[in-house]
Image: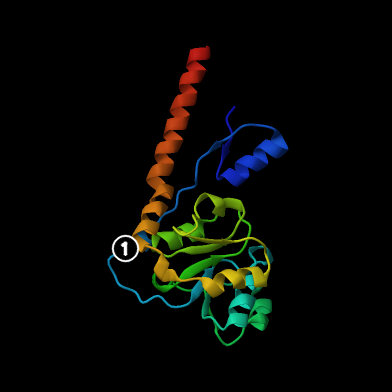
Amino acid sequence: DVIIANSTHIQADIRKYYRRDSTVIFPPVYMERFMKHENMRHKRRGFIISGRQTPYKRFDLAIVACTKLGLPLTVIGNGPDHARLRKLAGKTVTFLGRVSDEVVEQEFASAEALIFPGLDDFGITPVEAMASGTPVIALKAGGALDYVKPRVTGEFFDRQKPSTLAHVLRDFDSHRYSSAAIRAYAKRFSKENFQKTMRDLVVDEYKKFRAAE
């Protein structure tokens, strides 16, 4: 009776493939542990990328671009693409592997930006970075369209090519962004908002159902 999409990107796919309308309800992001660094001063240095290292996430774009520009890049996580990614990396790229939650929180809070080069239906990790007050540099596609706001929460690059990403990285300045404004925007994707939006939808649909009986 009702279809729910987790992003406007998926909403468009539902319209395209199923020819059905749907309601967008963003997934809940448990961001409190990232926001606890709000009153701590971290010196921001270098870029970060985090997640399971699979080909479709395109970690290679970030590694090749940062290697070419000589920019510091911290890579968190592991996966089937790990060995290939290491071969692409230069001296400025650091692989941390799997790390504790505390290390992830600290790394997110001290990065100049999180790079999100893959096409994802939503993407929880970028919103977690935003909860840390950290801007996001993302491919201009997929779920990122719902939370990356140029010059507010981050920047886009247009094509999945190292040179296109490198162009954005070359001119990127984290000092242009307000960590407080980024955190405030991230709160739109809180679990509380998810619960309220989901509850309201169920109540409204139930009322329609009863009225039609």
Whether residue 1 is situated above or below residue 66 in the rendered picture: above
Quarter of image, res 21: top right
Q: Which residue does the image show at 48% across and 23% down from the upper left?
A: 206
Whether residue 128 is situated above or below residue 44 in the rendered picture: above
Quarter of image, res 193: top left
Is 171 positioned to the left or the right of 129 in the image? right
Location of residue 52 in the rendering, given as x and y in whole percent from the top left corner: 59, 66
> Which residue occupies the extreme left position in the image?
39
Q: Which residue does the image show at 40% across and 75% down from the upper left?
A: 44
Residue in the foreground of this view, choosing between 109 and 172: 172
At label 1, the amino acid type is Lys
Q: Which residue does the image show at 50% across and 71% down from the upper left?
A: 172
User: Is residue 42 among the parts visible in the rendering?
Assistant: yes
> Which residue occupies the extreme bottom position in the image?
91
Whether residue 169 is situated above or below residue 157 in the rendered picture: below
Location of residue 109 in the rendering, given as x and y in whole percent from the top left corner: 39, 69
Which residue is identified by label 1?
36
Location of residue 30 in the rendering, given as x and y in whole percent from the top left corner: 41, 54
